[in-house]
Amino acid sequence: MDMKSDVIERASIVALASALLASTASAQVAAPIPFRDASLPVERRVDDLIARLTPEEKASQLVNQARAIPRLNIPEYNWWSEALHGVANNGYATVFPEPIGLAATFDTPAMLAMGEAIGTEGRIRWNQVERSGAPHRIMQGLTYWSPNINIFRDPRWGRGQETYGEDPYLTGELGVAFVRGMQGDDPRYYRVSATAKHYAVHSGPEPTRHSDNITVSLHDLEDTYLPAFRALVVDGKVESVMCAYNSVNGDPACASGFLLNDRLRGAWGFKGHVVSDCDSIADIQRGHHTVGTMAEAAALSMKFGVDNDCAEYGRGPGATSDYDRYLDAMKSGLLPQADVDASLRRLFTARLKLGLFDPPAQVPYARIPDTALNSDAHRALALKLADESMVLLKNDGVLPLSPGRIKRIAVVGPLADQVDVLLGNYHGQPLKPVTALDGLRAEFPDAQIVFEPGTDFLRLAEPVPTAALSTPDGARGLRGQYWNNGALTGAPALTRTDARVSFDRNTPAALPGAAATSIRWTGFVAAPADGTYRIGIDGRSARLWIDDRLVADNTDPQQRGANLVTMTLKRGARHAVRIEQTNSRFPPRFVWNEVRADALARAVAAAKAADVVIGVVGITSALEGEEMTVNLPGFIGGDRSSLDLPRDEEDLLKAVKATGTPLVTVLMNGSALSVNWAAANANAIVEAWYPGQEGGTALARTLSGANNPSGRLPVTFYKSAAQLPPFREYGMQGRTYRYFTGTPLYPFGHGLSYTRFAYSPVSLSRKTLKAGETLEATVTVANAGTVPGDEVVQAYLSFPDAPGMPVRALRGFQRVTLTPGARRQVRLSFDARALSSVSQAGERAVVPGRYRLTVGGGQPGTGAPTTAVDFTVRGRQLLPK
């Protein structure tokens, strides 16, 4: 063979090889890897993916900010989103009442509908970002860390507002409905996924939650702290559970064999994923000192089945990333690959069930129309729930107020015109929120309504207006310099004049596309009139200088609300302003309000000239909430040290009542208040909670009688904290209506109406039954009054006398709507678990003996209409944990 032929032959071989390679590559493109094949079972797809990952890629998926894996075309994903009572921190969304107000509705069908509405709006937000091609940021995912089903065992806990109250049964029923609505009923895909939190035995104190060890009996665990979690796992099929910060009986909640293995994955058969509360894995090392290193903490938690580490805040000394602790643990042999793969299997299964790796055309929730976001139907549902949440605590006949007869209304109290108090915490941004004052003006259009706050306490600082600001070169506003980094160094990426420093708290990143921004504003502020002003900054990681003096420092991570300083300002006098914020997702607000020395006198004058005074008072989420700095009497670290209404507000109520004008007190709050003076002296009291975007409308409708109040208390209102055991103790004796033997101010289940209800005797399916059998009860409820109304039928069980038995326990409820003279037969069913009780050793069983079933509009002996019947159980049946 000559040289020319040899060259031709070699060229042919190369061409053939290239063609074969191209053909193979083409085939690989045409045939997706099994993980991408939507026709295959989820288990096979997940196993295929895990087998393709490197150790570092695996580690990068174990934190809330899961990294992209470009070579496999897997995008980044942030697991952290919130939807406690509406999609939070992700633009405009419907804001429903705070959960403590939702609990007052005792309305499981409405909770199901709300869960569906929230899940729908969350999916729409996801779809919109998907279509835009932009990456999904924090709070823009489909894995929602809600609901909070901790038991509100003590009203001093600042986060009790997030819960469904103090009763395990009510909490479980409402929580299951919420989860089912959120997750949907598609056999293959979730609408969004829900998370039951904070597992477990978690309800304060807030300042020490990262290091507290909670000692709790097996009885109280089984009887109080675990039933709602069990209900959401077993009955609600919740996808995710969040483990708590604190330790329980010596073990961190995120490294507890009893909680995570014995109960959650063992007895309850949980198949979903476990996520940590944010930096609770780090707390295993630095808070509880259970181990010596972050790698050991990571390995220990994963050994017990924690799959996803919210490592958002603290990475520890020397850490280079939030997931290096897992990589270190794998490299050192602390963390076997089998444990890592088990967690990854659960995490990627969740993402597949959300449809994140399938064609949108195949996922039904990808086709939800954008018009469902902030829809009229969702707004109407928010109003329905707000209506139903209103609890009439007292009424001497002054309510309802007739819009035709009431001509002059004095509205007093610092909360009447505020939006923030409607929203509580963990909320979204409503489109058209209705304050109490707005609602009253709309409901009583012919009345003269005068609003006087009467006190500067809790008055919300407003953004400093453009007219009061000027830049160094004389323009209106402040000069803003923006850096797309963690500091204020180098040339700014953007310089502009901002008319005001007033960014919506739920709108992240001042620079488009930036995960965080550092900003400096400079210029001058001048007051429009002589006066005393409270001026400061609202927002984290921000500091404010006035005339080169640092007056507000919000770099304390526990700072939640506005940080204000009192200053005397002269009209037109310019004061130099510098505001700096570094490496923050949420830009701040520069705020102020004028302090009025004659505020109380003006309120009294308005009361004297009115036909009725409506006092809108209470507390806000700036005082009670999650681990925050509060330096006011009666409040500590987000919790409360006193249950009393703040003195400034009570003094206001006393002053306007002294005028002789009838006083209607409206309470806005997320926890029980010891309103002893109002209970004795106000003509009426309405508990409005943090009622959501439609709260003002619902309140005004309730005062006018357009809405007949039907809410019932989901917590006990005590006369004072002195009636309770120490806050730090978790034993249930002496707490909640089930174990409290004193006389409360207002009992659990209490709520008045503008009509009257009557009950027939209860009819039982049998008077004697064997342990394990189901008991059926029937009762007829009648509206014996003159106006339509809703009654909340409540069924309480009293048990045979034995150690550990509660005074009584809610075991059923149903909301019914009745016109005057109408009657409704209500059927209630009590299975073995509903009839069970818990021994001191923590065993749940149906025990023999004589029981009493009380059915009515509240607890027996509280003045509510009730009817009761006794029955007997023969034998004993032990129930599964």
Image: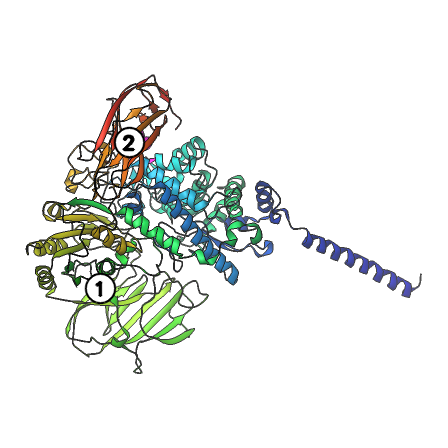
Residue extent of the magenta highlight: 215-226
Residue that carries the numbered disc 2 in the rendered image: 780
Q: Is residue 223 magenta?
A: yes
User: Considering the numbered disc 2 on the image, is that residue within a helix, a strand or a loop?
Assistant: strand
Q: Earlier in the sequence, mark 1 or mark 2?
A: 1
**Which of the 4 image quarters holds residue 484?**
bottom left
Q: Nearer the viewer, residue 313 or 431?
A: 431
Q: Residue furthest front?
A: 821
Amino acid on which the number 2 mark rests in the picture? Thr
Residue 524 in view in this figure: no
Residues packed near mark 2 inside 10 Å, few (<14), some (14 to 19) or many (20 plus): some
Q: Residue furthest right?
A: 1
Q: Is residue 299 above or below residue 768?
A: below
Q: Which mark is residue 564?
A: 1
Nearest to viewer (mark 1 / mark 2): 2
User: Percent position (x, y) of residue 253?
Assistant: 37, 40
**Image check: 660 left or right of 320?**
left
Contact, CB < 8 Å: mark 1 with mark 2? Answer: no
Q: Nearer the viewer, residue 725 or 368?
A: 368
**Which of the 4 image quarters holds residue 835?**
top left
Amino acid on which the number 1 mark rests in the picture? Leu
Q: Residue furthest bottom?
A: 473
Q: Residue at x 47, y 40 (%)?
A: 272
Q: What is the C-alpha distance between the residues marked 1 and 2?
A: 57 Å
Residues packed near mark 1 inside 10 Å, few (<14), some (14 to 19) or many (20 plus): many
